[in-house]
Amino acid sequence: MDRRRFLKTISYITGGLTLSGLYPFNKNKKPFKISLAEWSLHRALFSGNLDHLDFCKIAKTEFDISAIEYVNTFFFEKAKDKSYLTEMKKRADDHGVISLLIMCDSEGNLGDPDPIARTKAVENHYKWAEAAKILGCHSIRVNARSSGSYDEQLELSADGLRRLTEFGDTMGINTIVENHGGLSSNGKWLSAIMKKVDHPRLGTLPDFGNFRIQEDEWYDRYLGVRELMPFAKAVSAKSHDFDSHGNEINTDYYKMIKIVLSAGYDGYIGIEYEGNTLNEMAGIKATKDLLIRVRDSLK
């Protein structure tokens, strides 16, 4: 375990404090910042009502959010188009928006039991690490998908993630894994991969809601986030529906944010709204309002 991770873990273990006591030295510093995940607008993007190039503008002008998380689905054919990527960066810069990461899907299984397919999946992600570098992102978010027994999937996924992480490291890009179905939604399993690979450029992106392993098998979301936070380089505030008081009905945000901050995390928490009751714009706003209420309660 490297020194940075050791110190982060110690901070996490000893962090069972009240929320207001987590930041005693700088009361003016916000305990976390808010970003926006592009998937929150997936309906508008898929329908053509929103152009991917305007995502940064919407984040800033509609929600006053200055940090964004891209999804490769919405510019899948542009990964190697430097002029397009340069235009993305220019627009973000023009609006004073920081590009944090690219969420990468549909590039194969990094834990594929077939070594040829696994290698292809690893190499398929190279272009996204390169794109992330151009955009000024710190990470690419990937999936740890595999098949076989618990231990077999752990070994296979660790192999693919190690190789991809080593590539990203050559250009200063992190590889981070989200709990995103299958065994990746098992916090114990995914944290075991982090420990096995033990690379400073490999981390997690704990998502508040993605703890469905299969069918009706769910992992405890609070336990899962607690297990993944020592390795977190980003955090996703998943939201679906809200009660009359504006609280998310599936996740206790006050409890969850306490777990996040107790790990020593003070980076961005990304809004990822996936609900159906509110439209996307209203759902993003409701999630942001909730995060701000939680953050204000820490003062």
Image (cartoon, rainbow, N blue to C red):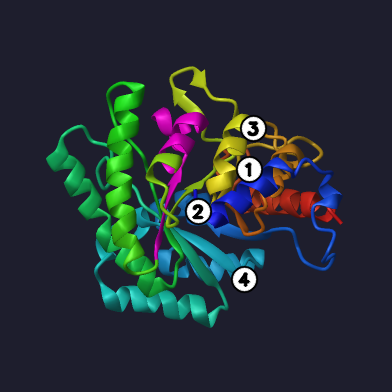
Mark 4 vs mark 2, CA separation in Å: 41 Å
Q: Amino acid at mark 1?
A: Leu
How far is mark 3 from mark 4, CA to CA?
A: 33 Å
Q: Quadrant of residue 158?
A: top left
Q: Give the magenta-colored segment's residue range.
A: 173-194
Q: Earlier in the sequence, mark 4 or mark 1?
A: 4
> Rounded to the nearest whole Å, what is the CA distance between mark 4 and mark 1?
20 Å
Measure the C-alpha gap from mark 3 to mark 1: 25 Å
Name the residue nearer the viewer: 268 or 16.
Answer: 16
- Whether tag 4 and tag 2 are in contact, CB under 8 A, the answer is no
The quadrant where residue 25 appears: bottom right
Residue 182 lies in the magenta-colored region: yes
Residue type indicated by callout 4: Thr
The residue labelled by disc 3 is 222
Of the image marks 3 and 1, the number of the one nearer the N terminus: 3
User: Residue shown at 35%/53% (left/top)?
Assistant: 73
Q: Residue at x 43, y 34 (%)?
A: 184
Judging by the rendered image, the residue that carries numbered circle 4 is: 61
Q: Can you tell which mark lies on residue 2? A: 2
Tell me which amino acid carries mark 3.
Tyr
Mark 3 residue crowding within 10 angstroms, few (<14) / some (14–19) / many (20+): some
Q: How many marks?
A: 4
Q: Circle 2 — which element?
A: loop
The one of 262 and 60 positioned closer to us in this rendering: 262
Tell me the SS state at disc 3.
helix
Give the quarter of the image for residue 87: bottom left
**Up-down relation of residue 190 to residue 171 (above or below):** above
The secondary structure type at the circle numbered 4 is helix
Image-based side of 96 in relation to 103, left or right: right
